[in-house]
Image (tube, rainbow, N blue to C red):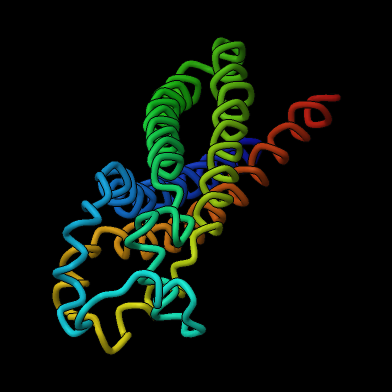
Amino acid sequence: MGDKPNCLSYFFTFINLAISLALIILNFVWLIPVMNNSKKEEPLVENGIILAPNYDNLDLDSLRFSKGDCDKNLYGIYEDGVYETFNFKMKEIHKYSTGLVSILFIQIGLDIIYVVGFIIAALIGSENCGGIIFIFYLILPKITLLLNLIFFILLSVYFYEGKIDDFKYLRECAFFDETNFNKTYDYIFLVYENCKKVFIVNLIYLSLNGCTCSINCMKCIFGNKD
């Protein structure tokens, strides 16, 4: 009878690890395109002429004082470039997405070490592996979760500063060749579409593992009073 709680504990532990691993894999699927595309250099402003073949006799002064969003944004692109006009923080997004990928790789390594330690503890007795389990199960996951949270918050801040909706609207302006526009700036849309997915999945990952760490701490503090 005394072994049943341990078996149940093992079962829920492995279920939690399986879900955690699935969420990490999904993070990789969407984070890696963010990391790779956000490091690309912005296309030269001179190439922007190709984007607006329908805008005859381009006059930047008239664009600057225009009241229309299309004209104002086109002026911004020619004067300051797309990144500055729409507040796309690509360097920061690249930096923090790369950091998040690195942390998730570390987390996978810790999960593998923990599974091996958990199996060994189950076979030879947890009391012989208590110190190792404590380090890998309680301390290190908290450190990686904290780093994950920090990088995730910074990535989210710079992501939400970008005016992606205004940029999507810009390609619908009458003077743009939408095919060339999409081809030239497709990587920006990829960054923002994948970032939205990362935001949801990593939030679930942080919530799940945060709850797990809290429960394990409570067990460590109050579970062995006997």
Indicate the position of residue 27 as horizontal and vertical percent values: 39, 50
Give the residue at x 38% y 41%: 94
**Between residues 17 and 170, which one lies in front from this camera angle?**
170
In which quadrant will I find the C terminus? top right
Give the residue at x 23% y 80%: 176
Q: Where 86 sits versus 28, above or below?
A: below
Q: Which quadrant holds residue 198? A: bottom left
In which quadrant will I find the N terminus? top right
Q: Where 184 sits versus 175, above or below?
A: above
Relative side of 52 to 125, left or right: left
**Between residues 63 and 32, which one lies in front from this camera angle?**
63
Give the residue at x 39% y 61%: 192
Indicate the position of residue 163 as horizontal and vertical percent values: 49, 66
**Between residues 59 and 213, which one lies in front from this camera angle?**
59
Indicate the position of residue 153 as horizontal and vertical percent values: 60, 45
Q: Where 202 sits versus 149, above or below?
A: below
Relative side of 186 to 75, left or right: left
